[in-house]
Image (cartoon, coloured by chain):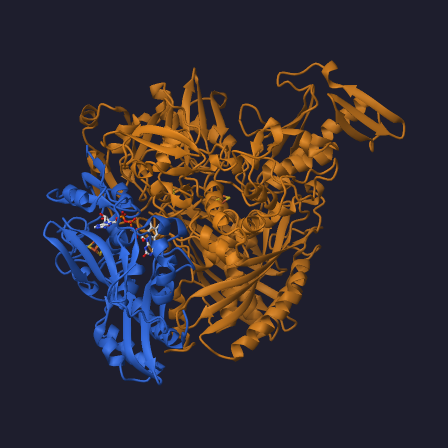
Chain colours: A blue, B orange
Amino acid sequence: MRAFSYSRAESVADALKGVVGHGETKVVAGGTNLLDLMKADVMRPTRLVDITRLPLNRIEETAEGGLRLGALVTNADTAHDERVRSRYPMLSRAILAGASAQLRNMATNGGNLLQRTRCYYFYDTGTPCNKREPGSGCGAIGGVNRIHAILGASEHCIATHPSDMCVALAALAAEIRVTGPRGERTIPFEAFHRLPGDAPQIDTNLAPDEIVTAIDLPARGFAAHSTYLKVRDRQSYAFALVSVAAALEIEDGKVTAARLALGGVAHKPWRDQAAEEALVGRPADAGSFAVAAEAVLRDARGFGHNDFKIDLARRAILRALQDAAASETP
Amino acid sequence: MTGTIDRVGAAAAETSFLLNGRPVTIRVPPIRRLSEALREDLGLTGTKVGCNAGDCGACTVRIDGRQVCACLTPVGQVAGRHVQTVEGLAVEGPAIGGRGGHEARLTRLQASFHRHGAAQCGVCTPGMLMAATDLLERNPAPTRGEVEDALGGVLCRCTGYRKIVDAVMGAAEDGIAFLVPQAGAAVGARVAKTDGIAKLTGEERYGADAMPADALWLRAVRSPHARARFRLGDLAALRRAWPGLAAVLTAADVPVNRYGIYPTGKDQPALADGEVRYRGEAVLALVGDADTIESLTDADIPIEWEPLAPVTFEAARAGGAPVLHADLPDNVLVRGRVVKGAVDDTFAAAAAASVVEVETAFVEHAYIEPEAGWARRVGDRIEIVACTQTPYMDRDEIAHVMGLSREQVRIVPTAVGGGFGGKLDLSVQPLLAVAAWRLGRPVRWTYSRPESMAASTKRHPARIMARACAGSDGRLLGYDFAGDFNTGAYASWGPTVANRVPVHATGPYHVPHVRALTRALHTNDPPAGAFRGFGVPQAAIAHEALMDDLAAKLGMDPLEFRHLNALRAGEPTATGQVLEASCGLAACIAALREPWRAARAAAEAANRAGGAVRRGVGIGCMWYGIGNTSLSNPSSMRVGLRPDGRIVLYNGAVDIGQGSNTIMVQICADALGLPMDAFDLVTGDTDLTEDAGKTSASRQTFVSGNAAERAGRGLRAELLRRLNVGEDAALRLEAGCVHARDAGGERTLRLADLEPDARGDVLSAVGTFDPPTTALDEDGQGVPYATYGFAAQMAEIAVDLELGTVKVTRIVAAHDVGRAVNPIQVEGQIQGGIAQGLGLALMEEYVPGRTENLHDYLIPTFGDVPEIECILVEDREPLGPFGAKGIGEPALVPTAPAILNALHHATGVRITRAPATPDRVLAALRAAGVGVTP
Ligand SMILES: Cc1cc2nc3c(=O)[nH]c(=O)nc-3n(C[C@H](O)[C@H](O)[C@H](O)COP(=O)(O)OP(=O)(O)OC[C@H]3O[C@@H](n4cnc5c(N)ncnc54)[C@H](O)[C@@H]3O)c2cc1C
Ligand code: SF4
Ligand code: FES
Ligand code: FES
């Protein structure tokens, strides 16, 4: 019989003490993902450290003119924060496009980064899955893979990262602040999530004994020209088939800066800097956007049920960039 | 389908918090779900559990004022916080007298829910109320969109959400006062539900809510394979390793291990015997204490599997596949057939002909309440308390499985948190009965959501090929239909589908020449059974596509084409039946004419401007035979008068949210001539009530309603006789006396002077009704149903040609219900049916093993269901109670066709494979070269 211990940390030091050196310890924040995975017997930590009372629950200005989002601020409070709404409308929209009001009230910013894939086989302990049980195989390759990756997948895993919030954070080039026994460090958003490669069991580059303390948003929020587009099977409360965070700066009809990230297509929020650069200096029109879309999807590959996502992603990129170009005020 | 985190190993610890304003301390593992702690440890079962995964919102409570899912909140996290549940909503405020001596307090929001009919089965209601309370506290005057956002995390499968939005927006209005109709004015009144208050306060008891504290827990071990042979390992060793196990039941423990709906089709084992035929089939039952049952995982169970290649629908259709049941060598369970005239000849002579192929998926009932119940042995009787749509059939089936007499079985139905056909089959009952009988202790069982989805029946996937033709005058000449239905591993209601579909195949039109053939085929898929419409919704997609196409070929407006061909009184149906009255399709279509013209013109004008988003308007029509197909299906109702002047309706018709508890009282009250509020209900306990048949086939209002009317008239006749007054005397109840006034003056009967019977009634009457039908001959000719419901719906949609997404923006629904006994409930059925039809058209597709939860299997949410206008056409049915027919299933049938036809109007592309998800819409557009291709 599996045995748990459950404790509540009152400070960051406390939490680290709980985590350090205990391989099967997990911190629990909102619990919306972890409890679900434990119920499904997919994750089997033996110790849980509740971190919801840590003083990481504020949104603050940074010296660089950006915002620091505490790891334990809820997704709801982040999305509704006046500063986030006015300066980073794309982020606010992305969060509100995800989950439901109850879940956003519970889910935390830190937990959102670390939520795990919604691959059916990952959840079904009766099937092989390299992410759940390294070396057991991948049920999705050759199985039902309508919701799976078209970019950056490996022969070991074709899962996608399910977050909406993270797609906007990728486009904003946020930074993740973490702390651990080796001290504090900052991880650029790009480097936080991993591609599956031959170790799909590892989702991120956060060390097992580190915790996330905050997400830093840089000053540049693309408030004038940005959007978050989510394509899904129903109108609300469903994970994305494909989503796009698109942000532009435009002067005299020309793109001077661009950001483009996709959700639902890869093991991590998929930002394509080459495509972004290709847009710079070009007119903010459909022709340029089509070139960018082609660039993002050049190496895309389907696995059968999800072939449609390649074309859908192209269309969604185009639409999102057009909407971003058109949007003046959030 | 393994253990849960609620009990495993964690050490108990004290957690203190405020619960509904009062401090509480509980000693449980801090990792236990708050929902579990509230329900099991604190006895507050008002908070419901529909999924345990954050998907359904039934468990919504407020923590420090904010709505959260209790199922994903560890108890440890609420230390020092304030938790509010539905039981804590109305702690102050005036008490109102509910019916049956029931006292309750309601907040304005709850009162508004009651007035608006916002709760049907009520299992989502506590969650809705908590989410709405959070919203209204922050924003007392929300917009529609704000309500939809705030409540968007709570799923409802019954109401179609519209009345819930209305109730939240109307919460500011005052009114604890509810309409109480005068004697004789109940039928047709917008009265609130007789059983509504308990659904708002959290007091209603559903299958999982009334479990005895000392019950053992049961859990089934289910097959992970669609088809496999298996061998059980050393179960004695398992027992030794897990001392908390009281029993491990196998096939050998089930006295008669075969059940099924039809006497000839008892093909389903309660526990598989060496071979499984679908993923999710039960193989073993573990019975023991809660901790043991919850801790055991499937990996602990010694089973050796030998998986075999499953028989797919394609393979079954092609023939020659491995045989599922030895007595059906071609895997064909049933063939259905209706043939009239010479259909082949008509096509040669026709001015226009069209063909269509339709493909639909498995659709899951997705009631928010998973199957649940408990059983105990009382002497040589077995008692089962469970959620069910059909207590009397359960009684007979359990008697059969247990090898007992019917008299030895008592079924006590709980409130049902949605059924839609899925709770017509046995679920928890047989294994609970076997376990409780053997162990002599109460045993309880609640399905998990994945278990409910994997084990229960589904809507039949269909492959339909149909063609129709018409003359140059626009009149239909011939209709030729061949449909295969995937009935899955066991018979269940497959024969009903195969027989009902051919009768309805042409749609509600007059067609002189018809051939309609169906097959129900066995496969290694989940058993397909009864689901709102019994195959007719699938067939309707075909006939409505054909009507549109023929109209286009003949240059006619689709609505006018249908109006011309609408079946009218005096015209024969495909089975040769001639309806003499209550044939209101033409009236329904006519009621849509104005909105149709306006919407079509507006959509076409908007589309001329181009752009990625195109609008479309489509129409769908349907008919639906009320009651069983050519089978006797009687109902009886008893009404009694107490010495104190209360009237008791003994109502065996199970209310699964559709409202029969209210409808029966309305009908009986008016038949009797006394007011509704004098009535108390005794519902569906097979020991106390008369057999009112199943809650299915939209039959309760028509069939049981007739019985209730007859019972009421019978009691009235008895009263009039005793009082010696004339037929038209007005009755009045007062202080234990019945007073009657007619031309001859006033008379009084003192009830206490009469001798009460064993039930405690001083006078009583029973009414019985069985709809007149005849058997169908080998060409399917005859009178399969006594009456039919008719409807026409119109859907307006917006299609994004670039992204393939479809948004339904408005539906206008005109339904001929004979007589709307309670317009609120009729609207509620229409709106809820439309939501399910919308799901069928656009998003619902069950894939065994892959979509066994409510985030991979999507049902419509608040944001998906548009504004719905209901037009009630009341073409009285002379046979119906006060002219009423049924509405339950008719509501769903025309919606998917109307949406798919609107898609065609918007894009020129016909999609006949449901659901039309964005990828399928894009593929169809691309194949047709339609759309802005960026
Ligand atoms: C029904 C449902 C629908 C959903 N729909 C969507 C959707 O449409 N879009 C979307 O984006 N998301 C969706 N989600 C996911 C939801 O957003 C995440 O579950 C949530 O953000 C996780 O946050 P949490 O605080 O609850 O994390 P937890 O469940 O508490 O933790 C998740 C993981 O993060 C780790 N963790 C948490 N905080 C920290 C920290 N500070 N440092 C280190 N590790 C940490 C935990 O150890 C755990 O491994 C949905 C979830 C559910 C249940
Ligand atoms: S895609 Fe990844 S998560 Fe899914 S089954 Fe394969 S390895 Fe597991
Ligand atoms: S039971 Fe909690 S969301 Fe379904
Ligand atoms: S009333 Fe909402 S689920 Fe039944």
Q: Is residue B900 above or below residue B577?
A: below
Report the residue at 73% width, 21% height from top. B736
Q: Nearer the viewer, residue A16 or A34?
A: A16
Residue B96, located in which quarter of the rendered image?
A: top right
Residue B18 placement (x, y as % from top left) = 39, 34
Residue A230 placement (x, y as % from top left) = 36, 64
Q: Quadrant of the N terminus of chain A?
A: top left
Q: Relative to residue A216, is residue B188 drawn left or right?
A: right
Q: Nearer the viewer, residue B402 or B141?
A: B141
Q: Nearer the viewer, residue B721 or A301?
A: A301
Q: Residue furthest front?
A: A63
Residue B507 placement (x, y as % from top left) = 57, 58
Report the residue at 12% width, 58% height from top. A198
Q: Relative to residue B755, is residue B857 drawn left or right?
A: left
Q: Is residue B236 above or below residue B36?
A: above
Residue A66 placement (x, y as % from top left) = 27, 65
Q: Quadrant of the C terminus of chain A?
A: bottom left
Q: Relative to residue B623, is residue B371 drawn left or right?
A: left
Residue B559, located in which quarter of the rendered image?
A: bottom right
Report the residue at 72% width, 36% height from top. B670
Q: Relative to residue B7, is residue B918 drawn left or right?
A: right
Q: Is residue A213 above or below residue B256?
A: below
The answer to whether residue B810 shows anywhere in this view is: yes
Q: Nearer the viewer, residue B873 or B426?
A: B873
Residue B880, located in which quarter of the rendered image?
A: top right
The answer to whether residue A195 shows anywhere in this view is: no
